[in-house]
Image (cartoon, helix red, strand yellow):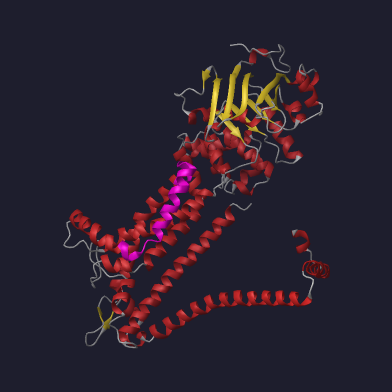
Amino acid sequence: MCHWLNRSNKEGLATLQEQVTAATVPTTGLRRRLRLGERFIEVWIFLSGLLAIVVLLGIIAILLKEGLPIFAHTPPWKFLFGAKWYPISDPPTFGIAPFVVSTLMVTLVSTVIAVPIGVACAAYLSEVAHRKLAETVKPIIEILAGFPSVMMGFIGLALLSPLVQSAFNLNTGLCGLTAAIMLSLMSLPIIVSVSEDALHVVPKEFKEASYALGATKWETIWHVCIPSALSGIAAAIMLGIGRAIGETMTVLMVAGGALAVPVSPTDPMTTMTAAIASGIGNAVRGGLQYQALFAVGLILFILTLAVNIIAERVLERQKRKFAR
Amino acid sequence: MSINLNVPDISARPVEKCVTKLKTEQVSLFYGSFQALRNITLDIPSRCITAIIGPSGCGKSSLLRLFNRMNDLIPGAKVEGNVELDGIPIYDARIDVADLRKRVGMVFQKPNPFPMSVFENVAYGPRRHGIKNRGQLEEIVEKSLRQAALWDEVKDNLGQSGLALSGGQQQRLCIARVLAVEPEVILMDEPCSALDPVATLKIEDLMRNLSQTYTIIIVTHNMQQAARVSDMTAFLMIEPDRAGVLVEYGPTAQIFTNPKDRRTEDYITGRFG
């Protein structure tokens, strides 16, 4: 079927098409109507694709338009590295270092928690568990990814924060660590799912070769499967990080909301997302705080974009690796 | 232990060199309810090349994989009967399978180097068995690559990916990788089926050289290859219920010139299969 479609002889193809159309659709009116339908669908798909791009560009444009003016008030380096966020003082100061440090800290801690567990779980599902068990467990883990974040925040608030408080002997259990643990739970499904996919496509031949050389199961997983799937696992980690950076509701509920630059993960803190969510309601439209929050959003957008681009690149490499 | 074959003469080999290396007694193999092999009894002599031939799907590879327990990796596989390596039953519960596979190496049908450098490919086995010293590893890698007749082609660039080599080179790399763990037996599952004739001849030469020190069992579709390289030949066939049975086993020269069983003769003369 395919070889005649690929043939460069367009004339032959046209004749063939005409024959096919003539054979199946006898009246010319019907044929025209079909062609119109075809055109309509083409245009529809094209417009849908265009819409996605337009929306993305629109968001960037608004972020730039609303966010950039703040840099006329506070220079970019002062904005980024300033430790004082007093948006309603007189004069107001906009230093977002507390938010940036909080975001980085929470993301780092959640990644450190989620990656070993996630990769180990993926290795278990892909290499150790029976196929049937894996096929049952994986969708369940993936459902966890769709769990509403407000519920995760609620669980963190009600269950986890008292535990963290007593375990680390803190004044409050609402701190970066609690948020990080909840975020690690939320990024776990994506890490498990994408890593498992990557491990699953490691050719059986590699594993057989390893076993045949007298390697144990653990040695085979550690020295053959994981290295072979490394770029896929790296992409999984990047996607997990992307999830953790962008998550808002949970951190807003459990991170504590302090405005100082955090020193330890057990300090209460406000991440960039939480700062925007809690601040934007009180900000005067077009005011300085409003602009500053948009600028925070801009920086957040650049961060997540960078993470996504890296993940995309890495996944692309994984795909090419076994195409020989 | 002397070798006990259904035919007395071992064609090209001095008899005293050959003792029974591997032995199967009344071995049957099941994949779930499907019986892949039935009542296979074989004595495989040491330092010889034993070829397993037979039509497609007759269980040649399954038989080969009995000897290093690769069938264990297939869920539902079950072995009945006795398989012995140097007189020790290898399906005993006390046997360490990793240790068995170190002694009984395997080369696969499709060359399957790891996606690592040539050096790391060969060093993989020794590393897993506890050799960490870089100098020692380099020595092993060079020795194995020389044994596999690949050294001269790759010595200038041991860091290149194993996947960057040609098919024939990849297969020799896989052989070097097996040699690096110093096995006693090497199982080869149609090692030349993915290779061109020149590469095939190279591998066959290599096999003849290796059989001075190693016991080699080769599964092959190619009867000329079996005739060219092997000392002993086992002919397997499918029974009506699709289980593989051993029809005839003996010195290659005898199997190819004077087969005792009618079915063997039909197969090697190309009347079926």
Identified at 41% across, 48% down, the residue is A121
Q: Which of B226 and B237 is in front in this view?
A: B237
Q: Which of A204 and A145 is in front in this view?
A: A145
Chain part drawn in magenta: A125-152
Which quarter of the picture shows residue A208?
top right
Residue A106 visible in rendering: yes
Identified at 72% across, 36% down, the residue is B202
Q: In this view, does A175 lie to the left or right of A149?
A: left
Q: Is residue B259 left or right of residue A91?
A: right
Quadrant where the C terminus of chain B lies? top right
Residue B83 visible in rendering: no
Quadrant where the N terminus of chain B lies? top right
Q: Which of B112 and A62 is in front in this view?
A: A62
Q: Nearer the viewer, residue B241 or A220?
A: B241
Q: Let me know if residue A39 is in the magenta part.
A: no
Identified at 72% across, 28% down, the residue is B54
Identified at 72% across, 33% down, the residue is B221
Q: Is residue B159 left or right of residue A254?
A: right
Q: Let me know if residue A138 is in the magenta part.
A: yes
Q: Main secondary structure of the magenta part?
A: helix
How many numbered marks have been drawn onto this rendered protein structure? 0
**A255 w.r.t. B190: above or below:** below
Residue B101 placement (x, y as % from top left): 53, 30
Residue A300 placement (x, y as % from top left): 39, 73
Residue B81 placement (x, y as % from top left): 55, 20
Residue A81 placement (x, y as % from top left): 31, 75
Which quarter of the picture shows residue A151?
bottom left
